[in-house]
Image (cartoon, rainbow, N blue to C red):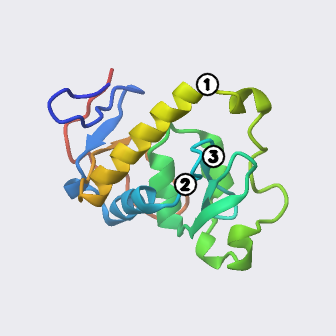
Amino acid sequence: MTDNNDNIPQCSFPPGSERVEYKDLDPAQKELSDILSNIKHDPTLMGVVHLGQDGIFRSLTADRDVVDAVPFSPLLIKAMMDRLPYREQTDKDFRGINGTKTPKEQWYKPLPGILPPPLEEEHRERSEEKLEENRRLYHEREKRVQGGEKRAVCLMSDNDLGLGLEKRKPKTTSESG
C-alpha cells in the first residue's frame, strides 16, 4: 500500500506492523537502511539479496554469483529479521551468528550450502517488458537514494537473538490491517 502524497510505503501487513520514520530508527536499523540503499545489485535485476547463516548479507546474480557482500553484526542480523514476519526458527537459526567473524575470503566464495539455489529457468523467462519496468523502477529508486531520500521502515517483529536487548518500544503509531 502506498501513500499517494509522498510515495512512502505504509505498513499494512501483518497485523501489528510498525511504521517507523528513518529519523526515529535505532542505530542498527539506520545502518541497515543505508546498507540496503547502497549494496550493488545484479545489473540484470534477476538476482536476489540473501542473508546467509554465516552472517554475510550478499547480493547475488540469478546464477548465485556474489555481486556484493557485507558482514552483519548480531545487531544488524536482528535489524534485518525485525523487518520480516516473526518465525521462531529464525531466532534459532541466527542466534549466536556474527558475520563480522566470517573470514573475508568466504564473503565472495561462501562455503557449500550457504547460498540459495540458482534461479529456475521458468523465472528467468520473464517478459522483456517486465524486466524493463523493473529496471526503470530500480533506476528511479537509485536516483532518489542518491538524492538523499531516507524512507520509512516497516518493522514486523521483534526477534530475540540472545543479545540481551529489551523489547522494542513503538516510536510511532502502529498501523495494521
Q: CA distance from mark 3 to mark 1?
A: 16 Å
Residue that carries the numbered disc 2 in the rendered image: 41
Q: Is residue 23 above or below residue 1?
A: below
Query: Callout 1: helix, strand or loop?
Result: loop
Q: Which residue is mark 1?
A: 127
Q: CA distance from mark 2 to mark 3?
A: 7 Å
Is any atom of residue 159 visible in this view? no
Which of the marked residues, 3 or 1, is nearer the chain's N terminus? 3
> Residue 65, percent across and down?
73, 57
Residue at image coords 48%, 63%: 76
Q: Is residue 156 left or right of residue 24?
A: right
Label 2 sits on what residue type? Answer: His
User: Which residue is farthest top?
Assistant: 177
Judged by depth in the image, the label closer to the viewer, 3 or 1, is 1
Q: Compared to 117, does 122 lie above or below? A: above
Viewer-nearest residue: 44 or 105: 44
Pointer 3 residue: 47
Quadrant of the image for the N terminus? top left
Name which residue type carries label 1.
Ser
Q: Position of residue 118 (x, y in %)?
A: 77, 44
Instruction: Identify the residue at image location x=35%, y=46%.
Output: 141
Of tags 2 and 1, the one toward the viewer is: 1
- Alpha-carbon neighbours of circle 3 within 10 Å: few (<14), some, or many (≥20)? many
Dot 1 alpha-carbon crowd within 10 angstroms: few under 14, some 14 to 19, many 20 or more? few
Q: Which is more toward the observer, 149 or 173?
A: 149
Secondary structure of residue under mark 3: loop
Q: Position of residue 67 (x, y in %)?
A: 63, 61
